[in-house]
Image: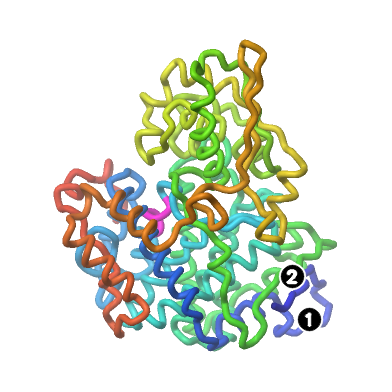
Amino acid sequence: MKTVTVRTRRAAEEFPRTDHLAWHLAEVAADPVAVETEVAEMIVNRIIDNAAVAVAAIARRPVVTARSQALAHPYLPGAEVFGVPGTYSPEWAAWANGVAVRELDFHDTFLAADYSHPADNIPAVLAVAQHTGRAGADLIRGLATAYEIQTDLVRGICLHEHKIDHVAHLGPSAAAGIGTLLGLDPAVIYQAIGQALHTTTATRQSRKGEISSWKAYAPAFAGKAAVEAVDRAMRGEGAPAPIYEGEDGVIAWLLGGPEARYQVPLPAPGEPKRAILDSYTKEHSAEYQSQAVIDLARRMRGRIPDLSQVVSIVLHTSHHTHYVIGTGSNDPQKFDPRASRETLDHSVMYIFAVALEDGVWHHERSYAPERAGRPETVALWHKISTVEDPEWTRRYHADDPAEKAFGARAEITLASGETIVDELAVADAHPAGARPFARDQYIDKFRTLAEGVVDKAEQDRFLTAAVEAADLPAGQLGRLNIEVDPEVLAAARPVADGIF
């Protein structure tokens, strides 16, 4: 790997384009290095994973709304929209599919200096691949780049410290992945990356306070913006430059300021793009730092025969968990049983309480209003707090995979005075966990979530196509779409009309 040092540059300073971070990213995207077999296999896993969570969300209001917008833009050759036949304008297909993938907060994650869901890249890259008639091998190459770029940006540049939403790393990575897919020159990819970054920077209010459906829409918007940015760049249009380092650029005014320095690791020329192997998917539909906490609650519940005897629960955890989904956020909404699903998904206090009571986690039932409103749940929920533990924060940022951890230590105090303590560093499904996800687990997740939504024959057809994705011939990537039971779609109607 090579490390690119990124800092603000004065307008009068000599700063060749080839030294810009966006140019370095474009060079990685344009590098024709082969995709390793292990990486290609993991990309297939994530294609299956995305399809699983998308079909599970197919009838939810935000997904129905996004799909209805896309269906107003039929196009030939076009791209596929999850659940329905036909082809649609690729940027709108990327939009609809991006919302479906993101809605349940149930797909993959990468955490480092910042955090991300790198599978958010798949809808945009796949939509362009379908529209342009590319082959499976092209898709795999494009996705290897998208995962690499997003992961490397997340390793090197912290956005959340400055309250910038993490999709600011997604626009550039999706643009880079599309550039690889289409075999574009670095000069074109450079402009697309700059445009995509410029149009997808926003504040983190989308994940604060009253969290709305925009949490699902934000990554889809970044994917749609990336498709459009590449299209403009291919037509010869440029971007603000230097987008990261400029005197009025992203670093100077949105991130650490003119004196800040960032170190972004990137593959050297000819070095394979392996970053996807450092990411991990979810067994539970909840924010990633909740994964180990859910497993920990399930493990501890047998030691507490009567939950009404709980006096307090303190979760000792990392800075991120405490301040984003814990009591360090100071969000009263995280204790409100009437809060949105998106808000409850970002309340580790709610999640630990329900997992402790139920011993299971379900992507719908665990968030149902009647579930959140149970008096005994509300009482338990309000006894839970989080504190930042420097050791958990250190492990969160550790470079050594054996040290890196996203869990917590729970201290449960009972009315008797007894204290029950346990901890879990990583989720059971994590590569270092008790039950690491492999191909069989991805397929099982798909089968479970597709039950009652996609008939068995269509499930089988999709899985065959997905497993063979790298070998699909040009023009056959539509086989990676899934048609949903028409009765399910018929019942999932938009609540209101819009412009389209």
Residue at x 77%, y 68% (from the top left corner): 247
Is 334 rendered above or below residue 462? above
Q: From this viewpoint, is residue 195 visible?
A: no
Label 1 environment density (alpha carbons within 10 Å; few <14, some 14–19, many ≥20) = some
The front one of 423 and 229 is: 423
327 relative to 63 in the view: left or right: right
Q: Secondary structure at mark 2?
A: loop
SS at mark 1 in the image: loop
Is residue 98 found inside the magenta-colored segment of the image? yes
The residue labelled by disc 1 is: 15
Q: Magenta span covers which residues?
A: 97-102
Determine the residue positioned at 25% across, 62% down. Answer: 482
Q: Quadrant of the C terminus?
A: bottom left
Horizontal side, residue 215 vs residue 278: left or right: left
Expressed as whole percent of the image width and height from the top left, the position of residue 349 reads 56, 30
Q: Examine the structure image and report whether residue 90 is included in the region drawn in magenta.
A: no
Q: CA distance from mark 2 to mark 1?
A: 10 Å
- Circle number at residue 245: 2
Type of secondary structure dominating the magenta stretch: helix
Q: Nearer the viewer, residue 482 or 359?
A: 359
Residue at figure coordinates x 60%, y 58% from the top left: 201
Specify few, some or many for label 2: CA neighbours under 10 Å numbering under 14, 14-19, or 20 or more. many
